[in-house]
Image: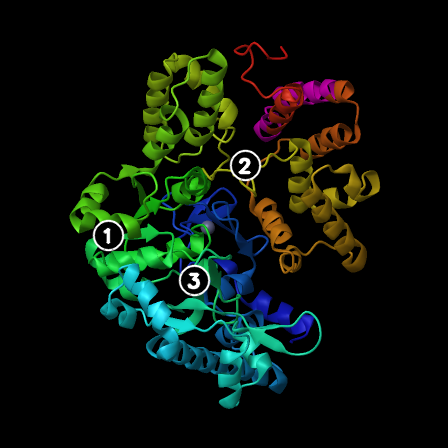
Amino acid sequence: MYSEDVIRRVRDSINVYDLISGYVALKKTGKNWLGLCPFHSEKTPSFNVNTEKQIFHCFGCGVGGDVFKFVELQEGLNFPEAVKTLAARSGITLPQDNRDHRQDKRTEDEKKTLLKIVAEAAAYFSKELEGPAGSAAREYLRKRGVSDAIIREFALGYVRPEWDGLLKHLKHLNYTPSQMERAGLVVKRSEGEGYYDRFRGRIIFPIRDMTGQVIAFGGRVMDDSLPKYLNSSETALYSKSHVLYGLDMAKDHGRKQGYFIIVEGYLDAIACHQYGIRNAVATLGTALTDGHLRLMRRFADKLVLIFDPDPAGVKASLRGFDLFVSSSMKVNVVSLPGGDDPDTFLQKQGQEAFAARLRQSAKFMDFVVEQVVKSSPSRSIDEKIEKAEEMLSYISRLQSGIERDHYLKKTAEILDLDETVLRQEMPKQTMKLPFAPAGGTAPAAPAAGRRRPRAEEILIHLILKDEGIARSLKDRIEPRDFTDPLFQRAVERIFKMLDEQGKLDTGALLREEDEELKNLLSHYAVLDMVYEDPAKSFQDCVEVIKQKDPEKKMKLLIRAIQEAEARGDIATIKRLTEEQQELSRRPGRKIPGKSGTSTE
Ligand SMILES: [Zn+2]
């Protein structure tokens, strides 16, 4: 590794604006430069560059950091590689570091070796399926309707129910058990010496990257034993949140047809391909991630999700809500008749019926409406309130005002509620709407859905803005006065830096190991919000935080809000009003004044 000195010299030689404007079109807004985030798909810019602190932060996906971090993410480099790249850009000669060079070479060699092992394993599994040991597996696949052509195309395989079949085979080819373990193929015994095969007595589905190289395997049992599916462990080659099964085969078809079909299992993806639905891919035992969406967005901007209609499948798809609305991909949903997955549906009803279902796919938000309010018509007022609240929580997260309006009307209609009343309830859910900060960036909370104490938030924001405030906070408050654990860690980290270095170096703070903490710090370091009288806001927030008695806290809050109103300090009013509302709402969660169980 390079010394702190060298790193600082390289960092200071590059202007964050010059660097990033080479990749992203940036527009000046307030203190920051604003553009469309290169790391997640969005239509409304939330990617901020701050030249004063020489950092960037995206309020959409939460990534942030200094110039090195940007190059790491943009070019897919590790930290030393990013240092090298930027040093070259500035014409700085780095101290010779042979060890580092050897390290790169080693990583590369390691990956090559792992790819070779995995390829050997794939050949072994495939041969086993063709051989005498594979007769039951071949019979199983035939019964499931998988054709020989598709078996070859997806290079399916089989492994006997033995503990060391693959292990012996690979040892014979001079690979070590430790290499096999790093390739995700064998498991170290928990007691005693030695290793055993991860996959035993299973049909094997090779998992390939976008270029068609095998990087991992999935295995399925042929009876009812558990686990039904098993995947390779995450390795240097394979990360399940960045790989889609079948994408190597589906990508060109997805591009031509303008969309991908997302199914849940290997056999579903394979059935789709066999029936000529060539743009189908499967997630590998995980919910769709931003990484998956980015992979597909290179080829198409539309997705059709086919989920199991069972409650777990529905729940899983609703969990993708924020991901789908924050990406600019159009997402539709198809539900198949109860009990059918794409595999069984295609076999029973064929391709035409499947295509008809695809044509009837619903917009994701209509699917949400269906699940939340239509599925079980509610009668009592309590039920209506509960459903209205649930719908509002979804509607308020939609990015387009037109869409919000549309679904508000729709919800009011279905629940037979007055639309105006429903609309009045909206701002409580959409705290971010009434006061967008200068520059129009939505101050999304670092972790969606979690409310952080607002007075604590103001303090964190202020100490990152102003070193003087950070110093005076240090004498007046302790990290444990903050109730939010992440804020506690942030304050601890900042105080430690002040102690050790005598100053606050935001760039260095953002090279913190802890991702969550790093994102929080870059969020508030970049957040462009003006306080009319920072010292006064600071003073009030310290008092509020230190006051543990709820009634006294409420009085302090009301006074602080009144004073902020007198000086026109919108940032402070907004946050402290939210804190006050939350404090007053704490005993019950119902819409005030509507429910019989309300505490009002
Ligand atoms: Zn982003």
Q: Which of 215 and 124 is in front in this view?
A: 124
**Residue at mark 1: C-beta within 8 A of ligand 1:** no
Q: Earlier in the sequence, mark 3 or mark 2?
A: 3
On the image, numbered disc 1 is attached to which residue? 347
In the figure, is residue 582 to the left or right of 41?
right
Q: Nearer the viewer, residue 411 or 547?
A: 411
Count neighbours of disc 3 (C-alpha within 10 A) and say few if under 14, some if 14 to 19, many if 20 or more: many
Q: Position of residue 117 (x, y in %)?
A: 47, 81
Local SS, label 2: loop
Q: Which of marks 1 and 3 is nearer the N terminus?
A: 3
Residue 311 figure quarter: top left
Q: Which amino acid does label 1 sit on?
A: Gln
Count neighbours of disc 2 (C-alpha within 10 A) and say few if under 14, some if 14 to 19, many if 20 or more: few
Residue 220: numbered disc: 3
Residue at image position (34%, 51%) is 263
Secondary structure, magenta segment, majority class:
helix
Count neighbours of disc 1 (C-alpha within 10 A) and say few if under 14, some if 14 to 19, many if 20 or more: few
| Residue 558 shown in magenta | yes
Q: What stretch is highlighted in magenta?
A: 554-574
Q: Nearer the viewer, residue 87 or 147?
A: 147
Q: Which amino acid does label 2 sit on?
A: Gly
The Cα–Cα distance between marks 3 and 2, rounded to whole angstroms, is 36 Å
Q: Where is residue 46 in the image (x, y as percent from the top left)?
A: 45, 45
Q: Which residue is situated farthest in the left direction here?
A: 352
Residue 513 figure quarter: bottom right
**Residue at mark 2: C-beta within 8 A of ligand 1:** no
On the image, numbered disc 2 is attached to which residue? 449
Residue 39 figure quarter: bottom left
Local SS, label 1: helix
Quarter of the image for the N terminus: give it: bottom right
The Cα–Cα distance between marks 1 and 3, rounded to whole angstroms, is 20 Å
Q: Position of residue 455 (x, y in %)?
A: 68, 32
